[in-house]
Amino acid sequence: MAKRGPYGKGIERREQILEAALHTIAERGFLATSVAELAEAVGLSQSGLLHYFGSKEELFVAVLRKRDEVDTAAMGEPTPEALIRLIRHNTQVPGLVELFTHMQAAAADADHPAHEYMRLHYELGTRGLAYVLRDMQQAGTIPATVDVEVMATAFMALSDGLQSRWLIDPSIDMEFYLRQCWAQFTGVHPHSG
């Protein structure tokens, strides 16, 4: 068996940190979790932990990327129903929704490390959903009159906006509003479940 060397060990350690951060933030919340607590959870000093990421902000962006990697693997093809299932799942990890919402606001500053992450999040997410919607149009599942670019953009914005609102008022039924939007826009009611 070949040795991994320092580079491989560094990648492995970074993954351990991200896994621990995902779990801790999901469980405790973004605002209730300090970098010092994350460092302690993986047996590092705060500066030792930040060595792997450069800054606290870059650490949190890396946590969001890791969350996306896990969610994408679980979600599969980015269909409207898969997006609704993801939103349902997010009600079980409010701390990660909190992290996303804070980084989303910070990303308005073009110099913030979250700026490029959010730009790509929306660009790739919208493009992927529009692609699936185009396929659905060709299969006759949704009307040809639906503008798939507008629908993909609106559906992603609605899902993220509802999650922000849900943090303020957890009684908001995000799934209900997403399904209603989908039905209003396409004339088709997605399956519930």
Image (cartoon, rainbow, N blue to C red):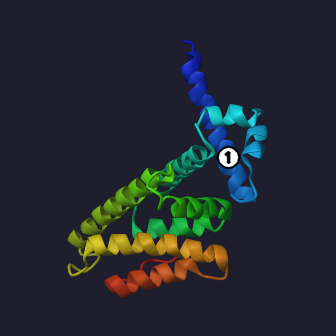
The residue nearer to you, when weighing 39 against 84, is: 39
Q: Position of residue 177 (x, y in %)?
A: 50, 83
At 59% across and 77% down in the image, what residue appears?
Answer: 165
| Residue 81 placement, left or right of 38 | left
In this rendering, the answer to whether 114 lies above or below 161 is: above
Q: Residue furthest top?
A: 2
Quarter of the image where one finds residue 100 = bottom right
Q: Position of residue 123 (x, y in %)?
A: 35, 58
Which of the image's four quarters has the C terminus? bottom right
Whether residue 127 appears in this view of the structure is yes
In this rendering, the answer to whether 10 lies above or below 49 is: above
| Residue that carries the numbered disc 1 in the rendered image | 21
At 53% across and 64% down in the image, what residue appears?
Answer: 105
- At label 1, which amino acid type do we have? Ala
The residue nearer to you, when weighing 192 against 73, is: 73
Whether residue 189 appears in this view of the structure is no
At 50% across and 77% down in the image, what residue appears?
Answer: 192
Q: Which secondary structure, mark 1?
A: helix
Quarter of the image where one finds residue 88 = bottom right
| Residue 65 placement, left or right of 182 | right
Quarter of the image where one finds residue 15 = top right
Q: Position of residue 56 (x, y in %)?
A: 63, 45
Which of the image's four quarters has the N terminus? top right
| Residue 37 placement, left or right of 6 | right
